[in-house]
Amino acid sequence: MSTVVAIDGPAGAGKSTVARRLAERLGYAYINTGSLYRALAYMANASGVPLSAIDADFLNSCKLEFRGAELFCNGRRLDAELRTPECAHGASVISADPRVRDFLMPVQRRAASHQWIVMEGRDIGTVVFPDAEKKFFVTATPEERARRRLAQSGETGAGATLESILADIKARDERDMNRATAPLKQAADAVLVDTTGMTVDEVVEHIAALCR
Ligand code: DC
């Protein structure tokens, strides 16, 4: 048995920070599922496999597992190397492939087994855990998400401007929301949390209150 709080929403809505802080607050484990898609994009790049050539053999050569919140691929911890614009883009592209999504499903379900967990992604409340106890769809306007991303730097490439980040966010939204398999969308029973103009503390407080 597990108890899942699903946090879904578009890129740059502040989901990761909110989900991690919420998990701490509730005393739950925390899993970021986007890192699985990023890890496959990273491994493909590191092994010289073009994203368009990802097949069953490649997928089966990637043994992905979470140990707590930490992700390991073939026994190697993957973390900072996944937080690049290249991995973000690659993850978004390969996440449209149903074979990739099928491959990652059991990894996600296993990560949640027998614990209380906050799991963050795009399709947690709709596909991975449709019976999750609590579901939140965390979003903000594209302009606000672009401003936050620019302020954080980190994942923005050198020379990125507000305009280029906004264009990138809109392109990712477009891909994530319009893919045929498990597109990004709010589950019918999810609570919409529009974080535009809210601080992280306010968002965590708001969601934690709804979880009680
Ligand atoms: O949350 P993130 O930016 O690390 O996610 C990277 C990409 O992975 C995102 O553009 C779409 C994909 N993704 C997905 O399709 N389903 C998930 N549950 C998590 C991420």
Image (tube, rainbow, N blue to C red):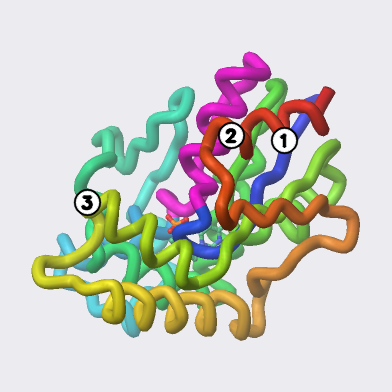
Q: Is residue 25 magenta?
A: yes
Relative image position of residue 120 (x, y in whole percent): 58, 45
Residue plotted at (58% across, 34% down): 111
For numbered disc 1, what is the local secondary structure? helix
Q: Is residue 93 magenta?
A: no
Query: In this rendering, would 74 be left or right of 173?
Result: left
| 3D distance between C-alphas at marks 1 and 2 | 22 Å
Residue at label 1? 207
Residue at label 2? 111
Ligand 1 closer than 8 Å to label 1 CB: no
Dot 3 amino acid type: Gly
Circle nearer the N terminus (3, 1): 3
Foreground label between 2 and 3:
3
Residue plotted at (54% across, 47% down): 15
Circle nearer the N terminus (2, 3): 2
Residue plotted at (77% across, 60% down): 126
Dot 1 amino acid type: Ile
Depth order, front residue of 76/128: 128
Dot 2 amino acid type: Ala
Residue at label 3? 154
For numbered disc 2, what is the local secondary structure? helix
Q: What residue span does the magenta drawing correspond to?
A: 14-36
| 3D distance between C-alphas at marks 3 and 1 | 26 Å
**Which picture quadrant has residue 123?**
bottom right
